[in-house]
Amino acid sequence: MDPQTTWEEMLDAVSDGDFEAASEAAEALLNWLRRGGFPPQPLTRVLTDEWDHMICQFVCGRVLAANSKQEIDQ
C-alpha cells in the first residue's frame, strides 16, 4: 500500500463529494496505520511521524463520520 497515494485519493474524493470512495480510502489508511504502517505526509510542512499519524487518524475519522451522515463539513 502507498499511504501517500491513498491519502491523496481520499482528499480528492472528499473534494468531489464521493462519500463512498472517501470512506473506503479512509478505512484502508486507518487499517494500514493500525497495523503499524508509516503515515503519509498530510501537510506540506514536514512533521514527525507521530504528528502525521495523529492528523491522519483524525481526518480519516471525520471522513468516516461524514460518510455515515452523508455530508462533509466544509
Image (cartoon, rainbow, N blue to C red):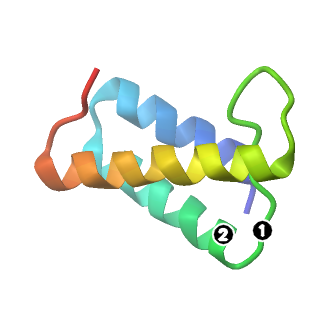
**Along the viewing direction, whichever of 45 and 27 lies nearer the viewer:** 45
Label 1 with label 2: CB-CB less than 8 Å: yes
Direction from residue 55 to residue 19 in the image, left or right: left
Mark 1 and mark 2 lie on one chain; the one further toward the N terminus is 2
Question: Percent position (x, y) of residue 9?
Answer: 54, 40
* Tag 2: amino acid: Trp
| Secondary structure at numbered mark 2 | helix
| Secondary structure at numbered mark 1 | loop
Above or below: residue 8 compared with residue 70: above
Question: Percent position (x, y) of residue 42?
Answer: 68, 35
Question: Percent position (x, y) of residue 50?
Answer: 78, 52
Residue 52, by quadrant, is top right
Residue 16, by quadrant, is top left
Spatial separation of the CA atoms under disc 1 and disc 2: 5 Å
Question: Could you say which disc has been placed on residue 4 in the image?
Answer: none
Residue at screen point 84% across, 35% down: 47
Direction from residue 1 to residue 28 in the image, left or right: left
- How many numbered discs, if any? 2
Direction from residue 48 to residue 8 in the image, left or right: left
Q: Residues within 10 Å of mark 2 (few under 14, many from 20)?
A: some
Location of the C terminus (image quadrant):
top left
In the image, farthest residue toward the left: 69
Above or below: residue 15 compared with residue 40: above
* Tag 1: amino acid: Gly
Question: Could you say which disc has been placed on residue 37 in the image?
Answer: 1
In the image, farthest residue toward the bottom: 35
Direction from residue 25 to residue 54 in the image, left or right: right
Question: Could you say which disc has been placed on residue 32 in the image?
Answer: 2
Location of the N terminus (image quadrant):
bottom right
